Image (cartoon, grey):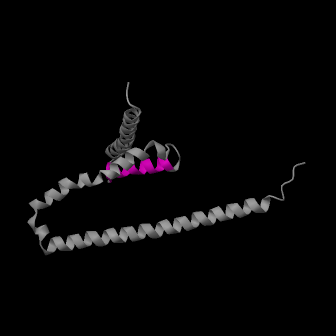
């Protein structure tokens, strides 16, 4: 009855909605923890920590949230439109003070990108070294294994 392309598209949309639901559950878990324990952090940060811990300890797989997260990242700029339009209410942001704020934002963004790049390189080098060590151990042990 339905075209195969339409069915595939419908399944993709449903998958994205379910995955966004999973991300939303982590957000509300974080909000609940902050509300219950009176932690002085935003609930979204606690929810993100819960999500990261769930991924690290393999409670959930990346595949369970990947499409939903990619979709949200793709439309992320839409979330900034209200903030951008709200700047109109503050004409002082269009003066020298605004220019200084913009420069501070650009500088902090560039610093964040730089530090993230450095950390990524360090982690990649450690992973490569670990992989090489594992490979050399495997190669060294090939001729020594005897079964009686």
Residue at the extreme right of the image, as rendered: 148
Report the residue at 47% width, 44% height from top: 63
- Left or right: where 115 falls relative to 75: right
138 sits left or right of 118 in the view: right
Choose top left, top right, bottom left or bottom right for residue 94: bottom left
Judged from this view, the residue extending furthest toward the top is: 1
Give the x, y percent position of residue 137: 73, 62
The segment highlighted magenta reads: 41-55
Q: Position of residue 67 (x, y in %)?
A: 41, 45
Q: Is residue 50 magenta?
A: yes
Percent x, y of residue 26: 38, 43
Who is closer to the viewer here, 85 or 89?
Answer: 85
Picture residue at 24% right of the left edge, 52% below the top:
78
Q: How many marks?
A: 0
Task: Indicate the quadrant where residue 68 lies.
Answer: top left
Q: Is residue 24 visible in the rendered structure shown here?
A: yes
In this view, the residue in front, 77 or 55, is 77
- Asked if residue 61 is positioned above or below residue 105 in the image, the reply reads above
- Figure quadrant of the N terminus: top left
Which residue lies at the image location 50% right of the left edge and 44% below the top edge? 61
Nearer the observer, 78 or 60: 78
Whether residue 39 is visible to the viewer of this picture, yes or no, is no
Q: Is residue 48 magenta?
A: yes
Q: Position of residue 106 (x, y in %)?
A: 28, 70
Q: How would you classify the magenta stretch by its main secondary structure?
A: helix
């Amino acid at each position: 009855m339905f075209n195969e392309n339409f069915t595939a598209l419908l399944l993709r949309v449903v998958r994205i909605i379910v995955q966004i639901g999973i991300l939303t559950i982590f957000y509300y878990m974080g909000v609940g923890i902050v509300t219950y324990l009176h932690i002085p952090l935003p609930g979204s940060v606690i929810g993100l920590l819960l999500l990261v811990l769930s991924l690290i300890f393999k409670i959930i797989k990346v595949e369970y949230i990947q499409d939903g997260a990619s979709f949200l990242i793709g439309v992320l700029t839409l979330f900034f439109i209200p903030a951008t339009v709200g700047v109109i209410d503050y004409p002082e942001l269009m003066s020298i003070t605004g220019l200084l704020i913009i420069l501070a934002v650009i500088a902090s963004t560039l610093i964040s990108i730089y530090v993230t790049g450095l950390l990524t390189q360090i982690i990649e080098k450690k992973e490569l070294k670990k992989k090489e060590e594992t490979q050399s151990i495997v190669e060294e042990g090939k001729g020594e294994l005897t079964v009686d």
